[in-house]
Image (spheres, rainbow, N blue to C red):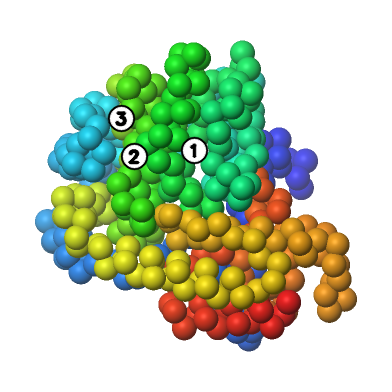
Amino acid sequence: MNNHLSERINNMATSATLAMAAKARELRGQGKDIIGLSLGEPDFNIPDFIKEAAKKAIDENYSSYSPVDGYVDLKQAISNKFKRDNNLEYGLNQIVVSTGAKQSLANIAMVMLNKGDEVILPAPYWVSYSDIVKLAEGVPVEVPTSIASDFKMTPEQLEAAITPKTKMMWFSSPCNPSGSVYNEKELKGLVEVLKKHPGIFVVSDEIYEHINFRGGHVSIAGIDGMYDRTITVNGVSKAFAMTGWRIGYLGGPDWVAKACTKFQGQNTSGANAIAQRATITALEAPISKIQFMIDEFHKRRDLILDLLGEIKGFNLNVPEGAFYVFPDISSFFGKTMKGKKINNASDFALYLLEFANVATVTGEAFGNPNCIRISYAASEAELREAISRIKAAL
């Protein structure tokens, strides 16, 4: 029946993170005790003050279609947040609220990319970037990085990747999957290259900005010369544990925001009304309200690095943000364990699922075939048990 489906869907890869999560659920359904460290989802409950705001919105009958680009008072809260946290001045006409940051990214791709336009992706990159670009008929251009550079692209690598067809650069900081955080000096180095190529726009995915263990997030849009060339994407899924509420947003040039609103109007219309009202309360709250989650992730980061450091063959960096570790496990390639030949990171992840009952994600999905992604958005007890199982299986 695939003959009746479009080429675009037949050519699209399935999200590796969601596929591994589905496989883990299937095995649990068969009675297996699977520890899931594959999804990028905080294991905290939504803070009560946000829940109360949602209940209030229900009582106030926010049940009609919402404006395509978001409620005005939510966009004002987003504008205030950009000013408070990022020192960025975005007017209401420069902001679009969407059904998750993923939709914001898809909107940008669809309104800015033409067939054949190249998009530079420092690898590793978030799993959906490449296929979102392809869906918009763009061409992903991967720039490989490694633990040696803390999984960060250098200015020299950026310069070498630019061609006459380069339209955009997409990146996340803190990064999913590596947890790496670009500091101001590193971003300024990239900006010096971009200044020589004024036609290139940047998508800065800052969804993990508050889960930052080094202190002081830097937005590339705030660096001299980049404001009019950057679309800043964010949302409430990670910092506020609101993954299922599906609220993301972007700030950028008004003509980009207008085009995204136009596209979204024909695609999904406005985001969930109740979730939008709750998001106002979330964004207006001081960061201290969610500091307990950030502190806990920091503690878990240190724990999982200590535990994985005891396993021979795991090469680790020290991630400064998000809630992932991205170990290089290429030392296992070519080996046979329990009758299973490990040829690549996908084989390794499947081996851990089968023999350790631990779900991780292959680095191949993120543009780095030597690594796996392990989420530490799980309890300390689960992390200790999972790494103990991995150690035993290896």
Secondary structure under badge 1?
strand
Pinpoint residue 337: horizontal percent, then vertical percent.
83, 75
Residue at 54% x, 20% y is 167
**Tags 1 and 3 in contact by the CB under 8 Å rule?**
no
Mark 1 closeness class: few <14, some 14–19, many ≥20 residues within 10 Å: many
Pinpoint residue 362: horizontal percent, then vertical percent.
66, 58
Query: How far apart are the two marked residues, 3 and 2, measured between alpha carbons?
Result: 8 Å
Secondary structure under badge 3?
helix
Foreground: disc 1 or disc 2: 2
Q: Identity of the amino acid at label 2?
A: Val
Q: Quadrant of the C terminus?
A: bottom right
Label drawn at residue 222:
3
Residue at 47% x, 83% y is 381
Residue at 84% x, 79% y is 338
Query: How far apart are the two marked residues, 1 and 2, measured between alpha carbons?
Result: 13 Å
Pinpoint residue 225: horizontal percent, then vertical percent.
35, 19
Foreground: disc 1 or disc 3: 3
Secondary structure under badge 2?
loop
Q: Is residue 383 depicted above or below 104 in this figure?
A: below
Q: Identity of the amino acid at label 3?
A: Gly
**Tags 3 and 2 in contact by the CB under 8 Å rule?**
yes
Residue at 31% x, 51% y is 215
Pinpoint residue 233: horizontal percent, then vertical percent.
38, 39
Query: Is residue 242 among what the camera can see?
Result: no
Q: Identity of the amino acid at label 1?
A: Phe
Disc count in the image?
A: 3
Q: Quadrant of residue 104?
A: top left
Q: What residue does disc 1 label?
A: 171
User: Which mark sits nearer the N-terminus, 1 or 3?
Assistant: 1
Nearer to us in this view, 94 or 157: 157
Mark 2 closeness class: few <14, some 14–19, many ≥20 residues within 10 Å: many
Left or right of 57: which side holds 309?
Answer: right
